[in-house]
Amino acid sequence: MRQARFLALLALLLALAAPPAVEADEKAAPSKPQITLKDLHGGGRRFTKGIPNWGWRPGHIQLVRLDNRRGAKDAKGKGRNRQRVIQTMDPATGKTADLFNLSDLTKLVPGKGTRMRGVGRAGAPPFTWRKDGKALCAVVKGDLVWVDLEAGTQRRLTTTDAPMSDLNISPDGSYVSYSLGNELWVCATNEGKPYPVTKGSSATLLNGTLDWVYPEELGHKTAAWFSPDSKQIAYLQMDQSKVPRYRVPGILPLRSEGREMFYPKAGDPNPKVRVGVVPVGGGETEWVELPEKAEYVLQVSWAAHKDGGGHGTYVLTANRAQNTMWSSGSAGLMGETTTDDGWMERQLPPRWLTPYRRLGRWKPDATQWYIQDTEATVDQLDRFHVTITPEGVDASAILHIDPASGACFYAGREHGSTTQGVYVGGPGTKRAHRAPFAKDATQWTTASLDHTGTYALVTTSDAVTPTKRVLVEAKNGKLVREIGNAHTPLLDKLKLATPEYGKIPVEGMTGKISWRLWKPHDFDAQKRYGLIVHVYAGPGSNMVKNSWGRGPLMQTMLCDKGYLVLQVDGRGTGGQGADWLYSVYGKLGLLELEDQVTAVKEILKRGYVDPERVGIWGWSYGGTMACNALTMRSDVFKAGVAVASVTDWRLYDTIYTERYMGLPKDNPKGYKETSASTHAKKMTGQLLLMHGMGDDNVHAQNTFRLVEAFIRAKKLNYAVHLYPRRGHGIGGASLDVFTRLVNWFDRHIGPGR
């Protein structure tokens, strides 16, 4: 007892002698703010801020945005209703005004309502503008309301409890179309009730309704197209009766069989697709004649008849191998394009400058833009095919064009560059000329111009500088005003990681492997660091871009923990021409992995990276690369994290996979050699697999099949974490994903390992 009292007294004296806890904490407090995973993936946003999302109102030299505001308190002084107000800005004066409060429309649609579906993975927009910007169609509790801003009137168009999708407005604003119950419906905007213009749909026959694979892999944003005179509407019909079904498992409900979807895997039957034309008022469908070997419908639009007399359909199709395209349709604009090198890139929707002048991209890798005069003949090359952007630049978008002269502003990347610029082009352009408002070649620059080309909203950033948006005069680059800046003062207190860029030649290729190495601010070449490779590497993609993107914050956090972070663009990535792009055909993931290894070995030569502490991680295609790295090159990669990975290309969809791999029956060796499961027995490193059970894009089946291969190979050096109900992006669990990722690397290649 006496001893116990003595110990207690001693503890009290020691406590009194100790400095206050607050002072100790203050002494231990870091001299700079620390980046945490919660900052990056837990909803926190301390180091950057949002930028007002202004855009251009159609047909007006006026900026517009949707402003979400807190409304007034209710009668009891408690709740606040959210107000969604369309706000405008005069670009010349900067004066803002409220144009319309969408929340006021809820009184026209009483009750709970339903939710309108988006097309593909894109959500449904809250409203859609009429072409002239003087009217709009709003989505209110899943129903449609027509708002005439000039007349000051509103009219409820639909009354349904079933979810709709794919809203379109006719050119003259007289009609809207939408998909409901796998049929195409039309409603006049001034009077009358909605009515279906197609019939005979079912679970397997879709009229004016898109399946899963067309929006995902061909970029379709709609399945219906009004004619220029608003009297007819073309639509896709998709017959899925031969397409195999896949059941996305239902895990959380007490009893659930999950959700069944139509999903054609590589080699499976595709949906049979044709294009029909029906009068807006309803009637018999007239089917467009398509080439016999056409497997995919890439584009649908309307064009002036080649021989005069109104407009007809213009349809672009491709064969199953996606190396031949045909143009056909009632407009009479026939043609064929073929490549023997690889594949045709995804095609953008056609854009008609005048009834007979079409804007498009050419070359199989779709790098240059041209204007085609459809009234000209093939021997009139000066009119038939006029190039308006130069060779050596991957021109991603035409931002504004003068229909008469062809003078344009375009966004693009010069081959081998890590930055995107905005350039001026036009007929006869031989080299890249930067726009007056985009002279800084060190900045990643994008722009949006009003329909007259008077003003430009210009957005810039670089790898360590957050996004900034300004309004300028397009022709001379004169600054009008700053629109927003994501920078915060707290960011200046951070010691950000810094990037080093480099290139590695590849024998027999004109392109070079591009890499970026992130180092801590206090980098010491005498130390030994772990190396984490962050990979994507999919066809046409790029990671080594001098833009903020998600910023250097994740890299800074990892560098503060004793790692360097490497990103590599090897063969198959974009921005270095067709030969570089097509080199991976038939063997996805193999040359890309070889180039990742080449870059790692280049860094290892410097001596400050521990070769026993090299890891790799990626998501989606990047997850595929991480699986390949651990199963094929465990001599280099000691740990990996793979999220939502394709582990066998036979498990992924037809359009994407066959574009780059061919059909399984034609390339059995390629499919076998590129599968991580084939090489499972060779893995000696430590691999963490993560997947969303509700992923309808890359099915969790991919992870399960690889796990089965590990079991058969008697491997124990892996772990699996699954996310119930979550999709491809594992929404709502980002903090969980990245906490596990960082912990995995700390455990297996962290300091002291």
Image (spheres, rainbow, N blue to C red):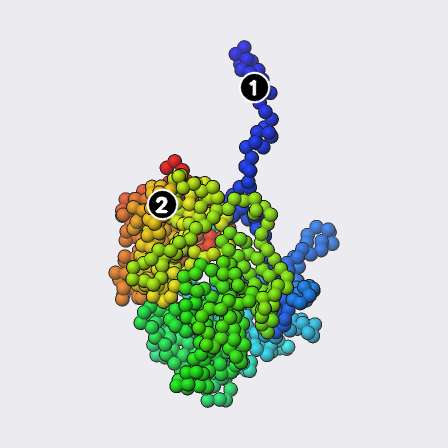
The three-letter code of the residue at mark 1 reads Leu
Residue at position x 31%, y 72% in the image: 340
Residue 184 percent coordinates (x, y): 51, 74
Q: Residue 618 shows which numbered tag? A: none
Residue 139 percent coordinates (x, y): 60, 66
**As displayed, is residue 80 above or below residue 364?**
above
Mark 1: few, some, or many residues within 10 Å (few <14, many ≥20)?
few
**As displayed, is residue 122 above or below residue 6?**
below
Quadrant of residue 128 within the rendered picture: bottom right
- Pick the front one: 703 or 528: 528
Residue 41 percent coordinates (x, y): 51, 48
Quadrant of residue 324 within the rendered picture: bottom left
Residue at position x 32%, y 52% in the image: 598
Q: Is residue 670 visible?
A: yes
Residue 195 percent coordinates (x, y): 56, 76
Query: Does residue 362 appear to the left or right of 31 in the view shown?
Result: left
Q: How many marks?
A: 2
* SS class, disc 2: loop
The three-letter code of the residue at mark 2 reads Arg
| Real-space CA distance between mark 2 and mark 1, rounded to the nearest whole angstrom | 51 Å
Residue tagged 2: 606
Residue tagged 1: 14
Q: Residue furthest top?
A: 2
Circle 2 or circle 1, nearest the eye = 2
Residue at position x 48%, y 62% in the image: 420
